[in-house]
Amino acid sequence: MKTPVLNQYFFFVFCTLIWGTSYTQIKQPKDSIRTQDTLQVKEDKLQNFVEKNKNNNKFNKFLYKYLVKNPRSQEGEETTKQFRERHRSFKKMEGKIIRNIHVISQDPFGYSVLDTTQKPEKWIERAGNDLHVRTKDFILKNYLLQEEGDALDSLKIEESERLIRSQRFIRRVRIEAKTITSSSDSIDLYVYSLDAWTIVPGFSYANKKANFKLRDKNFLGLGHDFSNTYRENFETKANSFKTNYRVPNIENTYISLNIDYDVNEANQYTKGISINRNFFSPLTRWAGGIRLNQRTYSDSIPNTLEIPTQHFKTSLQDYWAAISLNLFKNTAFFGSRTSKFIVSARYFNQKYLNSPGLDLDPYNFYSDQKFLLFGVGVAQRYYVQDRFIKNYNIVEDVPIGTTLGITSGVQNKNGSNRLYVAGRAAIGNYFRLGYFGSELQYGTFYSHGKREQSLLSIKANYFTKLFSYRNWKFRNFIWSDFIFGENRIDFYGDQVTLRDEDSPGISGFNSIEPLGTKKWITNFELQSYSPYSLLGFRISPFINSSIALISKENENLFKSKLFSKIGFGIMFTNDYLVFDNFQISVAWYNSIPYEGNSIFKFNAVDNQDFQYIDYEFGKPKLIEYNSRTIN
């Protein structure tokens, strides 16, 4: 029987969906890039006031000199029409020889990728640029899929621009091809880029613990990500340290190197190194990787012996390789070039150097295992450009495509072998009412002819077209995950929770209970894109809600207790100021075990939880079930 609170919750969700869907039917801007950039922006009255009265007093002079960024930078945005015309020009120059490649890399503040004559005017912009190390030209060239002397390939150029745009140290990028003379068979390629401000310091203090963080996402202008965190506990005099160094692209090979080390206050550590090359583009021919990892940690296994925590030590060796072949012989058409047949293989060896005894682990779940996996599949994937999804009026690359694949292999664990078989199907595209993506997976182990630890996983995500109410823009987002485990082990390690870290989970939900073998989580979000700004900060409210069901194998999922969350937040995005974006939020939970009922948490909801379905078929994986198993 539904309580009044649940009735109000469902009424709120219903009204949100009906209101959003109704506006998706009103006049839509013609997309494509899918959504045009015709957002009418309200005047910032406070900024105009400061600008007009900047010489009246020292405070206004300070605001104008150090905080207000010249709005001329907004005029440097590439319009949808310009974007489309520039990409069409690549096709007109198809086959021409690339004579030279010129890279024009700009500092973060006061510059534009459209107007190269634009310079920073304010002292704080110039100071910020002086502190910034600009991306090296050869680093940007390393992300190009074409070299000098190649025949221009429009698809490779568009992919190169997307790959540069996907790097977190780049804010804007534009590639242009210019003919040398009208009759020439050669062209020059120009790569214009605008760096992002990449140095991110952080400090927090709570419960007699101080946290210091410093991260540079473009270390020394090399595109490397270097992150360090130090925490001091003034009560216990213990400390912790975490460092990570990542090279995303070694010498134009798209091979990445990642080194990480983490030690906590209890002297428990994680250390590892990995080398990987994914199918970073639909045009990629081969992929593979190596991962070596060792970890010590503590976990709480529910037990009747009143033992609060158990200590673990594991080591992992993980190797994989894959090759991609054209599915069709005729590669003259775009769709044919991005349709691939993929064959892959993987071997990993996990060892438990320290694990609970049989008193706490009667099924010997935490034990050594070796796994040999093979994958065969077909995939067609590419990207569509859109705006106003996760960012404000910035071109974003939305993955669309179709994937069909089979994964099979043998697991050796506890002195016996088991066959593993799984299948995966995924599809995503834009439709009349917006973007829709879905994924269906089913996998099971076979032992002595019987199915064991079977798993059905269904994912779906959707967002509407951009819709309008007066001068505001909105999108609705919905994403849902259904996990159904069958013949699972009746043990903590082989069960699911609603914890945030046990993906999919509820953001801000940290309890290990309830436990189950099946769960269904659905999230709703209404994101606004505001025409109003305050001192250059655009104030964009969002509403985020989640409902979840979880139950054990012998229980009816749809008769289990409903867990829900409703959150409200405001995202501050800046167009005029030098500072980074930030957000504030609050969330209400109807119930969290061991914490209580009707709970409020601040900054527990994030409007970036929506994730695209991956249409890549590469490394053979087990279907994701919980955070305690390797996939």
Image (cartoon, rainbow, N blue to C red):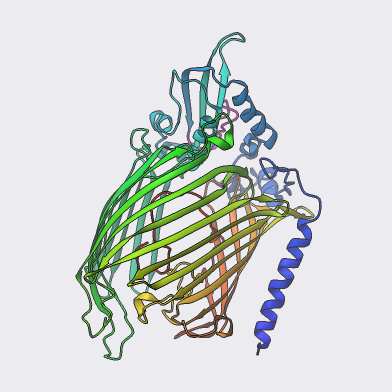
Tag count in the figure?
A: 0
- What secondary structure predominates along the stretch shown in magenta? loop
x, y percent for residue 468: 76, 54
- Residue 629 sits above or below residue 555 on the image: above
Q: Nearer the viewer, residue 220 or 175?
A: 175
Q: Residue at x 49, y 73 (%)?
A: 484
Residue 203 falls left or right of residue 64:
left
The N terminus lies in quadrant: bottom right
Residue 252 in sight in this render: yes
Q: Which region of the structure is painted magenta?
A: 107-125
x, y percent for residue 306: 28, 90
The C terminus lies in quadrant: bottom left
Residue 195 in sight in this render: no
Q: Nearer the viewer, residue 120 or 379?
A: 379
- Residue 520 sits above or below residue 402 on the image: below
Q: Quadrant of residue 385?
A: top right
- Residue 472 sits above or below residue 169 on the image: below
Residue 310 lies in the magenta-colored region:
no
